[in-house]
Image (cartoon, rainbow, N blue to C red):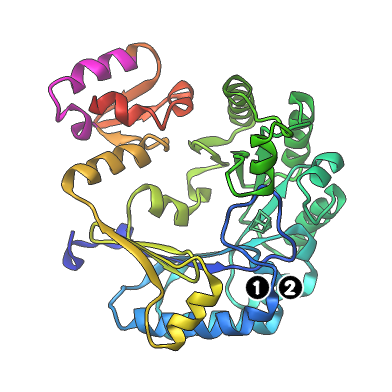
Amino acid sequence: MNKQEMNKEDLPGLYVHVPFCKTKCPYCDFCSITDTSLVASWLEGVEREVIAWGREGFSTFDTLYIGGGTPSLLGKGEFEQLMGILRNGFSFAPDAEVTVEVNPDDVTPSLLSCYMALGINRLSVGVQSLQEEELRFLQRRHTAARAQRAIELIRSSGFDNFGVDLMYGFQGQTKKSWADSLDRVLSWAPPHLSCYQLTLSEGTPFGRLASEGKLRRCTEEQGRRFFTYTSNFLQDHGFAHYEVSNFAKREGLFSRHNQKYWQRTPYLGIGPAAHSFRYNQRWWNTGSVGDYCRLLREGRLPVAGQERLSPEQERLERLMLGFRTGKGVDIDDIIGRSSGREVLGRLSSSGIVRIEGKRVSPTLYGYLIADRLPLIFLN
Ligand code: SF4
């Protein structure tokens, strides 16, 4: 695809990574540090990076996603400075979706009115669980009551579009406690929900405990049960299960920004560890906050790696990403191979995929093996 071929749906998305957290959760392998004395240097780095990319011809963005880390720990002055840098350096569509990730503990009326005044129109709230014991186990900063209060404040401040993040599949959680958390979250009538299975990644305190046998991992069967319960329950309550881990009340409430990742629309990532994609090329920034600031001070881009995808890699990627979503994949990407039609017939009659016109999308059972589906078609 070249620049001339881009139409409105292809407008790029902008991601900004705020690599700071007040405390580090023991399961987290995201790029985030607790040394907030680096916020000012990071903001200087962001400004330099924005100016550098502003010259590189990214067209108007129609989504901005400020994630982390914990963007809501930025003070109002810092957040205003960040938004000023972004709006000076780039242009945004008038109806751009502008999301900020927030920690329930940080949500106050004055923070929300600052966000509102700066054009933020969507919030993603990291609730994770509504069981006090589970929140303590996960070492989250907030309590269930604080999460509920945050949602009340969000609603009364006029934010209609918000999402709640929840987690399942960790030691001590039961089907009953998960069902109770889901019930209580639904009483808030959230427009969007993300439900992720906890992964115990190597290099995290929880990952180490698991490899020493001191922390139980969720088995595949337990994960499957949590997943199917969640999907059935939320669909029964009117949610569309539009991506493996994501649910929304209607299509207009799907995360427009995240869909760019799944549909391979160009996006630019600013900040440490941020990833970018354009014209079959991917590149990613260094995950070290110190190196990020230093490289930009030296007049260099903080890019740590890049790759150019071959047509075959692109096809595999279209299948990998497409099978994670309700929109599925283009049938031509599957039946391009002689065995594709036969495999498609088998998976469709076993209820793993459904075929509608030229689209092949995963069923609930297909979602369960979404990562394996591309390989089944390619082998
Ligand atoms: S708040 Fe989020 S980004 Fe920060 S340490 Fe916890 S899980 Fe990681």
- Residue at 77 percent across and 75 percent down: it is 110
Tell me the quadrant of ligand 1. Answer: bottom right
Question: In 3D space, how far apart are the residues under numbered discs 1 and 2 (Cα atoms)?
Answer: 6 Å
Residue 368 on the magenta span: no
Q: Which residue is mark 2?
A: 111
Helix or strand or loop: what does disc 2 sit on? helix
Residue depicted at 40% across the width and 15% down the height: 351
Question: Count of labels shown?
Answer: 2
Q: Is residue 8 visible?
A: yes
Few, some or many C-alpha atoms within 10 Å of disc 1 (few <14, some 14-19, many ≥20)? many
The residue sitting at 19% across, 20% down in the picture is: 341
Image quadrant in which you'd find residue 160: bottom right
Q: Which residue is mark 1?
A: 115
Q: Is residue 275 above or below residue 135?
A: below
Q: Quadrant of the N terminus?
A: bottom left
Indicate the amino acid at tag 1.
Tyr
Name the element at disc 1: helix
Q: Is residue 332 left or right of residue 305?
A: left
Q: Are marks 1 and 2 in contact (CB under 8 Å)?
A: yes
Seen from the viewer's position, the closer of residues 100 and 250 is 100
Residue type at numbered disc 2 = Leu
**Residue drawn at (78%, 58%), measured in percent from left and top?**
150
Q: Position of residue 367 (x, y in %)?
A: 46, 28
Q: Which residues are magenta?
A: 331-348
Dot 2: few (<14), some (14–19), or many (≥20) neighbours within 10 Å?
some
